[in-house]
Image: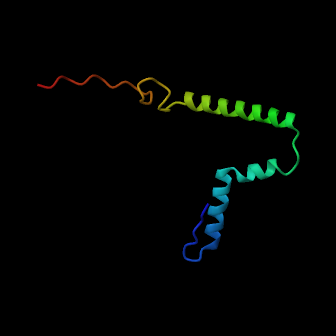
Amino acid sequence: MEIKVVRNNIEKALKDLKNQTQKDGLYKELKKRRYYEKPSVKEKNKRIEAQKKKKLSAAKLTRPGNRNSNSSGRPAGPKRPPSAPAQ
């Protein structure tokens, strides 16, 4: 991971670093490893997390305007009237 400081703007660089580490899941991992977790609890949490991800992806697919929500690949919307034949 690399964060560049532009024009000695350290505050911006720190903010970018924080955003990058959050996106990478580093904070979540640190929080998880703060205490020992029994293997049975690990498995349980893993199953719960998988269910959350599955539910979230299913919700994204059924959201209106989603490209994958219908077979044509276009968002569902009002039908256009047929165009007149060219003469």
Residue located at (27% from left, 22% from top): 82
Residue located at (68% from left, 53% from top): 22
Please, is residue 79 above or below residue 67 in the view?
above
Place of residue 68 in the rendered image (x, y in percent of width and height, measured from the top left): 49, 29
Place of residue 73 in the rendered image (x, y in percent of width and height, measured from the top left): 42, 29
Instruction: Determine the residue located farthest toward the bottom in the rendered image.
Output: 8
- Judged left or right of residue 55, residue 41 is right
- Judged left or right of residue 85, residue 14 is right
- Judged left or right of residue 87, residue 83 is right
Place of residue 71 in the rendered image (x, y in percent of width and height, measured from the top left): 44, 23
Which image quadrant for residue 51? Answer: top right
Instruction: Determine the residue located farthest toward the left in the rendered image.
Output: 87
| Viewer-nearest residue: 45 or 40 | 40
Place of residue 15 in the rendered image (x, y in percent of width and height, measured from the top left): 65, 63
Residue located at (87% from left, 42% from top): 37
Quadrant of the image for the C terminus?
top left
